[in-house]
Image (spheres, helix red, strand yellow):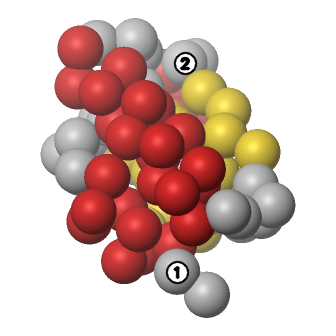
Amino acid sequence: MKIEILGTGCPKCEELAGNAEMAVRELGLDAIVTKVTDIVEIADRGAMMTPALSVDGDIVLVGKAASTEELKKLLSP
């Protein structure tokens, strides 16, 4: 599973990244969490607000720093 945090590095983007990493650990997922900070690439992917969360290329969350528990529900198999 490929999880990407789309954002410029603002506090909410960092919070989402940390929560995503924790959710992956707690669920025991075989996943890689990376950050995409290039605003042109973020816009090209269709995210008009940040932070955004992409799972395997599909944007599943936009405009909020979801909690670890919310992310666990989104990422659960």
- Name the side, left or right, on which 24 lies relative to 8: right
Q: Which residue is mark 2?
A: 37
What residue type is disc 2 on?
Answer: Thr
- Residue 57, image quadrant: bottom right
Tell me the residue at 52%/57% (across/down): 26
Task: List x then y, in percent, for residue 3.
Answer: 64, 51
- Most foreground residue, 11 or 40: 11
- Name the side, left or right, on which 13 lies relative to 67: right
Please name which of the two marks, 1 or 2, marks the residue nearer to the observer: 1
Tell me the residue at 36%/20% (across/down): 14
- Most foreground residue, 43 or 51: 51
Q: Which residue is mark 1?
A: 76
Mark nearer the N terminus (1 vs 2): 2
Give me the C-alpha separation between circle 1 and circle 2: 26 Å
Quarter of the rendering occupied by the N terminus: bottom right
Tell me the residue at 60%/50% (across/down): 25
Is residue 13 in view from this perspective? Answer: no
Label 2 environment density (alpha carbons within 10 Å; few <14, some 14–19, many ≥20): some
Name the residue at the bottom extreme. Answer: 77
- Label 1 SS: loop
Is residue 67 in view from this perspective? Answer: yes
Position of residue 31 relative to residue 64, above or below, is: below
Task: List x then y, in percent, for residue 76.
Answer: 52, 80
Task: List x then y, in percent, for residue 63.
Answer: 20, 46
- Label 2 SS: loop
What residue type is disc 1 on?
Answer: Ser
Task: List x then y, in percent, for residue 32.
Answer: 76, 45
Position of residue 19 relative to residue 24, above or below, is: above
- Name the side, left or right, on which 23 lies relative to 33: left
Quarter of the rendering occupied by the C terminus: bottom right
Q: Are marks 1 and 2 in contact (CB under 8 Å)?
A: no
